[in-house]
Amino acid sequence: MILKSTVNNRIFTFKSVRELLGKANEEKSGDVLCGIAAASVTERVAAKLCLSNLTIKDIYEHPVIPYEKDEVTRVIYDGIDKKVYDKICNYTIGELREFLLNSTTNQHDILNISKGLTSEVIASVAKLMTNMDLIAASKKIKVQSHCKTTIGLPGTISFRNQPNHPTDSIEGIIASVKEGLSYGSGDAVIGVNPVIDTLENYTRIINALHEFVEKYKIPTQICVLAHVTTQMKAIKTGIPIDLIFQSLAGTQLANDAFGITVSMIDEAMSMGLEYCYPEESNIMYFETGQGSEVSLHMHNDVDEMTLESRCYGLARRYKPFMLNNVSGFIGPETIYTGKEVIRADLEDLFMGKMHGLPMGIAPCYTNHMDADQNDQELGTVLCALAGANYFMGVAAGDD
């Protein structure tokens, strides 16, 4: 494995695959803040050139966080189809990119080969792609999922109705639900982020939403986005659950900070399938976002895009009904400009779909970023073109 390349008669040498992946990433404020990003455009080009000549096997044999130290790594590697991997392991990352973009390559080809790819490999090929490449490749992949309804059908796009209220007022939540529905938002899910994460408050909100949906016979799913342990308590008390939600991170350390483990998510899914739905249903809902690990200082010196891909490797274990990024929400310490958030949205959509996930996007921004509504709308249009399953319904994209 050769970790060096020459650009303009200058030799660039990289100490590890982990460092190479960080240097090859398009600029993100979080990577710059952590000293992971390339020091110049020339170094970034050199890293991409070096990465393009590595093989899938090279990346596979050098996970960014060792197998024995991180359960996210273990989930990713234990889930690989070794027969598929053995057939493709000698592809270079550059050849993998060409395969994905070839006009004769279809969805079946892509989803079959993806079974043998680790999340780091999927991140690697995305680093070699332009925005147009990411759109072209993403558009080829259509992943459907089914809970009470089906999302991801050809020619459709769905929305999450997000009727949050600063005091968890039922009247305020229902008013927001009605407004969202009037715009056609809510066919993917009506999902509330509760301010107070207790079983009592969870029960109060979800019962009100179920009553509303049943009264008007609305074909959708309901989710109150409390911590997964609160939802598990609710299942045990017999409260009806449509979707089980949890935020995920790309390192074990960051998931520890979220208060979750793989065994905990395993148990939640098993409870949902036992008490709520038959085995073939997709009942999990996950959110991720580039930079969450950086914000927690639990990124293990890995760039935020590669860690985002690892989130999808973890999510793939659970065959979720839906998963979306919130990369533009996390803050300027991770993604600062409109250009960065648009790039992150396109990367996330591609990487999620490459993992076989029913991928949605939260094309939003926060006011303390150097971005505006035009950036948000451009990201929304490009992700729609790339075939996002659904969008988060955030008014004006200002989260």
Image: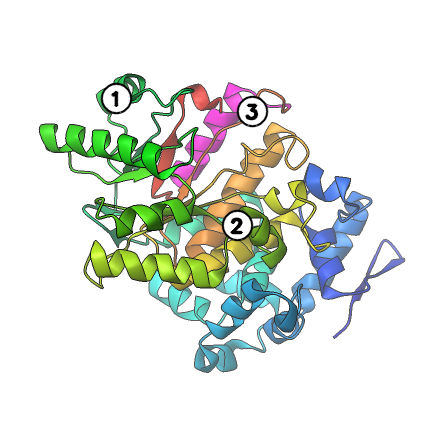
Mark 1 or mark 2, earlier in chain: 1
State yes or no: residue 374 in magenta.
Answer: yes
Mark 2 or mark 3, earlier in chain: 2
Callout 2: 10 Å neighbours few (<14), some, many (20+)? few
State yes or no: residue 388 in magenta.
Answer: no
Callout 1: 10 Å neighbours few (<14), some, many (20+)? some
Please provide percent x and percent y for residue 68: 63, 73
Is residue 389 visible in the rendered structure shown here?
Answer: yes
Disc 2 versus disc 3: nearer the observer? 2
Q: Residue at x 42, y 35 (%)?
A: 197
Disc 1 versus disc 2: nearer the observer? 2
User: What is the distance, in whole Å, between disc 2 and disc 3 at their CAs?
Assistant: 25 Å
Callout count: 3
Q: Which mark is residue 174?
A: 1
Please provide percent x and percent y for residue 345: 51, 40
Q: Would you say 274 lies left or right of 66 here? A: left
Viewer-nearest residue: 190 or 228: 228
Q: Would you say 328 lies left or right of 238 here? A: right
Q: Is residue 68 above or below residue 215?
A: below
Q: Given the image, on which type of amino acid does mark 3 rest? A: Thr
User: Could you say which quadrant of the image residue 114 lies in?
Assistant: bottom left
User: Could you say which quadrant of the image residue 250 lies in?
Assistant: bottom right
Q: Which residues are magenta?
A: 370-385
Q: Given the image, on which type of amino acid does mark 2 rest? A: Gly
